[in-house]
Image: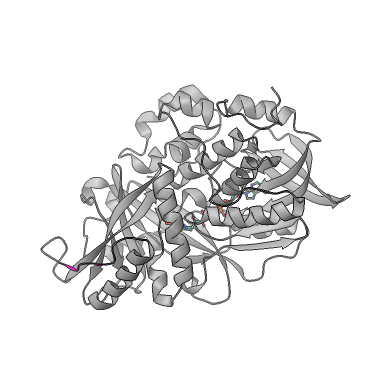
Amino acid sequence: MNYFQGGRMDSEFSSSTRTIALNDLDGKDFEVTVIGGGITGAGIANILAENGITTLLLEKGDFACGTSSGSSKLVHGGLRYLQSGRFVEVYRLLHERNYLMNHTGIVKPLEFHILTGATMWSSVELGIGISIYNAMSGKNPIVRHHHNNGEYPGEINGFYSYIDGITVDSELVIYNIVSAYRHGAICLNYSEAASIEKSDGRYRVGIKDTLSGKSYNISSKILINAAGPWGNDILKLAGMPEEENFRLSKGIHLVFPFTVWNRKNAVVIKSPIDGRQLFIIPSGEVAYLGTTDVFVTDPEDFSVQKEDIEYLIDSVKDLFPDFTSENITATFSGIRVLLGPGNDPGKISRDFSIRANENFISVLGGKITDYRVGARKTAKIVSKLLGKNMKIKNMPYIDYSRESDDVDHIIKYECPLKPEDILRRRLAVRLYSADSGKSMEDEIRKKIGGTHEDTYTGK
Ligand SMILES: Cc1cc2nc3c(=O)[nH]c(=O)nc-3n(C[C@H](O)[C@H](O)[C@H](O)COP(=O)(O)OP(=O)(O)OC[C@H]3O[C@@H](n4cnc5c(N)ncnc54)[C@H](O)[C@@H]3O)c2cc1C
């Protein structure tokens, strides 16, 4: 089989096909190479492959091992952005939210209660905001303020209810990756872009297989930097000017058994400590609480610090006293790319930035929710650079959905290479099951081989 010629709609995407692709990789030339296998890179590779562009995607860890498995997993319009008048952004996010809820099968509607009262939001202001939000999303703008009839503690006078989307972020990435692969892209996990040089109008990329240590060299007409928090490292590697005001902010989440929450709806509250907006989100056998927003300097720093845990627990302890540190079953975190000046991470834009410098395009920042917008804008630039017409409107589609959660199926069609790839990112039972996936570990290790060290640090 020739893995470098597109169109493999039903084919295997596994450790074996990865080996075949690597064995044949040295010296290959691509139209586009995408560095980074989070949602940004996955969406871009998908739209390019759907247009028949020869595309290579490199991910130094597993697909979605960066921020795209550590987000709050909301597919939303950003209700709070209305406060700062960001109507165009909210409209765009709502449009994408609706598309993803209606067309992917892995973004589900979730009811949110946003609380009102002296320590929360004013009911009049919030009522107007939610009416606008609903109207912009094409829903009935008439909203009703619900009085607190004992659902919430006494100081809460009521709540508004609205719908947003919830997903498993890492699965959305994997679906885009498999879709890109099925349309002909070469998608390699555990394959790091280790060196970048430019000669004869082409980028020469040295690739390191981070499992075997073997090296490969390819060339590419266009290079796309979708390395998220590592974005400036890639610019440095390529000898390009770094992004000014490139900063990172970490957000952590605490996972609790569902019984601690016991409600079908999510809730939005204000932290009494600093007035920040926090969520509690029910999902499967758990409910999670998040998130923080703290500057960090290291893109690898996904650690969950004691003071961050204390901040979240202290923020909800009066309203929801069962959210204690003893009840935490797991934690997860992500690192935002912030591109702007200022000392308050909460006030710096999270919108994506796309910059093209000759044939080198950096796509950094953004949200899970609008990854398709970033992919379309990038595809337009690629289309011009290659002088090829491309189908961009309403793209990319996801041409894959998992037939079953059977481990053998996942091993054959979603290219996990380590047990944690399944436990954390394909099935994500580390987060969503009451036992953090422990009951499945042995079966998965036996099937996939447990030779690689696992990095699970959840409690
Ligand atoms: C706490 C938090 C909560 C969030 N919640 C939401 C939310 O609820 N809804 C929403 O829409 N958005 C949310 N976001 C935003 C969203 O998660 C991010 O915008 C998105 O995940 C960024 O994806 P990415 O692909 O750009 O980056 P990443 O997912 O970090 O991917 C970059 C990838 O590049 C790889 N890489 C780096 N260097 C190399 C190299 N040399 N070679 C190969 N690969 C390399 C990394 O391993 C990584 O996998 C949240 C973000 C945070 C931090």
Q: In which quarter of the image is the N terminus?
A: top right
Q: Which of 100 and 226 is in front in this view?
A: 100
Task: Give the residue at the far left of this rendering.
Answer: 149
Residue 376: percent from left, percent from top: 59, 54
Q: Quadrant of the C terminus?
A: top left
Instruction: Identify the colour scheme used.
Output: one colour
Instruction: Residue 153: name its quadrant.
Output: bottom left
308 displayed left or right of 363 = left
Residue 256: percent from left, percent from top: 30, 49
Is 247 contained in the magenta span? no
Q: How many marks?
A: 0
Q: Which residue is drawn at 26% across and 72% down?
A: 127
Residue 450 seen in render:
no
Residue 16 seen in render:
yes
26 displayed left or right of 428 = right
**Taking 300 as reference, is 16 above or below it?**
above
Instruction: Residue 154: name its quadrant.
Output: bottom left
389 displayed left or right of 366 = right
Residue 303: percent from left, percent from top: 48, 54
**Taking 446 as reference, is 42 above or below it?**
below
Residue 451: percent from left, percent from top: 55, 28
Q: Residue at x 60, y 46 (%)?
A: 47
Q: Which of 372 and 450 is in front in this view?
A: 372
Span colored in magenta: 142-146
421 displayed left or right of 283 = right
Q: Which residue is drawn at 50% across and 57% down?
A: 370
Q: Magenta stretch: dominant SS?
A: loop
